[in-house]
Image: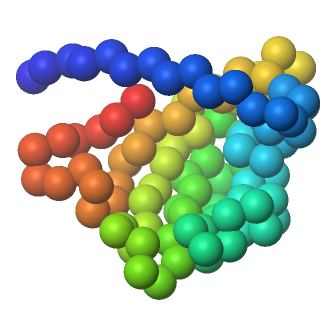
Amino acid sequence: MAVTKFTQEIKVKVSAKRIYKAFATDPYTALPKILPNFIKSVEIIHGDGGAGTIRQTNFADGAPYSYLKHKIEHLDVENRVAKYSLIEGPMLGDKIEKIY
């Protein structure tokens, strides 16, 4: 088993509160509106939206992948912290079990 760490920082012209809401607490309505040519829908497969929830993101037609599933590992709304595991989807291939 190998472990690789990758961190990416992106500057945006949107407040931290709004970007956190769009990606962490309300991606179901926000992401398809923000990225309509890329994301078709985001839905809860299991859970209530908090830690332990499994979400599926369905990509628009023509995207390189059809879907992916994330498990929310940790969600701290007050401090705007979200940790996810990518647990299923074509981008994992047959050699990667999970991306955290």
Q: Nearer the viewer, residue 31 or 46?
A: 31
State the image coordinates of residue 71 (x, y, percent, origin top left): 51, 44
On the question of residue 25 being in view, the answer is no
Q: Quadrant of residue 15?
A: top right
> Is residue 63 left or right of 25 when viewed as pictured?
left
On the question of residue 14 being in view, the answer is yes
- The residue drawn where x is 79% and y is 68% is 33
- The residue drawn where x is 56% and y is 68% is 38
- The residue drawn where x is 17% and y is 54% is 93
Vertical position of residue 59 compared to residue 53: above or below? below
Vertical position of residue 41 compared to residue 56: above or below? below
Vertical position of residue 15 compared to residue 92: above or below? above
Q: Which quarter of the rendered picture does the N terminus lie within?
A: top left
Q: Quadrant of residue 30?
A: bottom right
Vertical position of residue 37 compared to residue 74: above or below? below
Q: Quadrant of residue 96?
A: top left
Q: Nearer the viewer, residue 21 or 48?
A: 21
Q: Which quarter of the rendered picture does the C terminus lie within?
A: top left
Q: Nearer the viewer, residue 88 or 11?
A: 11
Protein image colouring: rainbow
State the image coordinates of residue 11 (x, y, percent, origin top left): 70, 25
State the image coordinates of residue 50 (x, y, percent, origin top left): 72, 40
- The residue drawn where x is 49% and y is 48% is 70
Number of numbered discs:
0
